[in-house]
Structure formats: structure tokens, C-alpha cells
Amino acid sequence: MNSTLAFVFPGQGSQQLGMLADIAAEHEVILSTFKEASDVLGYDLWNLVQNDAELLSQTDKTQPALLTASVALWRLWQEQEGVMPEYVAGHSLGEYSALVCAGVLSFKDAVNLVRLRGEYMQQAVPAGKGAMAAIIGLDDAKVVEVCAAIDGVVSAVNFNSPGQVVIAGETESVNLAMAAMKEAGAKRALPLPVSVPSHCELMLPAGEKLAAELDSIEFNAPLCKLVQNVTAEAVSDPVMLKKNLVSQLSEPVLWTQSVLLMADLGVTQTIECGPGKVLSGLNKRIVKGLDAASIGDLGGLAAVLEKNNA
């Protein structure tokens, strides 16, 4: 099993009020991991994710919450199974979870990093000036082409699965692009409820601040193969890992390409390590027949453990 397994870690949008409550009731490692993050952040992160939907939706709170949820589930998996996957990859913010679980950086450093990342992203674009939208039913090249014809800043930023691409940029340009996508044959163009336009050039100032922060943090070589969003390639050099994290803020997430790469390299099973099942759904659309499961709740965890120990 070891050689065919990849762990994948979700990004923003997978957070849910009350996430991991059922698992935390039975496994102490969940709450102890949240306590560790709370000590770094200076507030009770577990209380926030269980009780405050408004705060949980703010980028600088969402990012540490999702990172911590993923790392807590990873630690539980290690307690239960002790199996290191051959590959790890994370969608956008999820890449930081992948880096922690692959031994590249410490959990405490990552908690602080993603808190700052969220703050820098929020600061880069004034409220209401940026937007994101999901385009359903157009091929990747057409989405890129339509964006290029729109005035102002708008670009394809998340290549999530065939026929599902997210665009981001200035609010007015995104709105124009949504109308143009429908004219070009898109089945749907849906505005996303986000506070920042991630992965477009408006995030360049956030990248500069993040680069300065990363300079002071020690990165190790990963313990398994780590596929990064920006290149859709397995990267092991700590210097390149940092460089790609900076680029990731203002360049597209190549998720479709990342999953295809892992499948080409022999991956037959992906386990989503975080709340929700967003990536599992995408992965099944990207690679037909892929075994894509999630361990974000007790039922999912039990099913994966039972299957892998059969």
C-alpha cells in the first residue's frame, strides 16, 4: 500500500463550524493539537472553530484553523496507522499542512506563518476591491482566453478539475469575466464568498512580506515526495520549497496537473486529511477510478482504517 498512497490537504473553503467535534470527543490528540496552536496564536482556536462562524470566515483565522485541523488528523492517522505516504500535496493553504506533515517545518512555525499569510493577503487588497468566481463547464484554455480579453486584473487562479476553474482579480473585472464566460458557453459562473482574491497579481505585495518572513524560518528536506501547487512537480530542495510558497500567493494553483502527476507516478489512493470532502470529489473527477477517501469525521476515518487493514 505504501508506494501507492498520497495524502492531500484541503485549503480555504473546507472549514466548517463544529469541524472535528466527533473525532475530538474520542481522540485526545485533536484537542492537544488545537491547544498547541492556541498557545502560539494567543486565543482559544478550538472554541473559535466550534462556536464563532463569523470569525472562522476571516482569512487570518481560517488559515490557522484549517492547518491545525489537518495536522491534528495527520497525528491521529500516525497514532492509528503509522504509515508514511509516498506523496503529499496540499491545495493552496493546504500546502502548509503538507509541509508540516512531511517534516519540512515545525507545526508552531507553520501556525504563525499561516496567520501572517492571512493578514498579508487581507492587507494587500482593500475590502470589496477583489473577488473570485468559479467557472463551471468551460475548458481551461477557454477560461484563460476569456480572462485575457477583459480589461483590468482578472485571471484563472485555481485549476481544480476538468471543467472547474476559479478566476480572481479586481471585482469589476471579475464581474465582466463572469458574463463573458457565460457567453462563451460556461454552464455556470458563481461568485465565491471570499474576502481576498487569492493567487492573482493583486497578491504580489503579500508575497513580498511572506518572503521576508520565510527567510527567518528553517526548512528541512521532506520525508516523502511533496508536490507543490505552482509547478505541479515534486520538490525536495528547501530553497525551492520557500520560493514556490511565495510564488503560490500570486500564481495559479495547478491542482488538476498535480493529481495527474501523482497518478502518472503510480498513486492509486488519495486520503484527504482535513475537514470536508472537497478534494476527494475533485480527485475522482481528475482521475477516473482513483480511490479517493477522506478522514475528516469518525465515519470516514473508520472506513479508511478498515479498508487499509483488510
Image (spheres, rainbow, N blue to C red):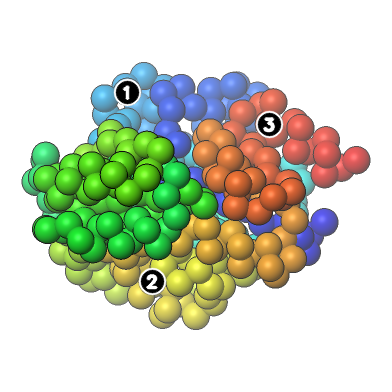
Q: Secondary structure at mark 2?
A: helix
**Which residue is found at the position 23% from the left and 42% from the top?**
179
Q: Position of residue 172 (x, y in %)?
A: 11, 45
**Residue type (three-letter) at the residue carrying disc 3:** Gly
Q: Tell me the tag on residue 210.
A: none
Q: Which quarter of the image is occupied by the N terminus?
A: bottom right
**Which residue is found at the position 66% from the left and 53% from the top?**
287
Query: Is the residue 261 above or below the residue 139 in the image?
Result: below
Residue that badge 1 annotates: 53
The image quadrant that residue 50 belongs to is top left
**Residue type (three-letter) at the residue carrying disc 1:** Ala
Residue that badge 3 annotates: 300
Query: Is the residue 18 above or below the residue 173 in the image?
Result: above
198 on left or right of 21: left
58 on left or right of 272: left
Q: Position of residue 258 (x, y in %)?
A: 54, 63
- Taking the view exactly as shown, the residue that stands out farthest to the top is 51
Q: Earlier in the sequence, mark 3 or mark 2?
A: 2
Q: Secondary structure at mark 1?
A: helix
Query: Is the residue 19 above or below the residue 77 in the image?
Result: above
Residue that badge 2 annotates: 244
Q: Earlier in the sequence, mark 1 or mark 2?
A: 1
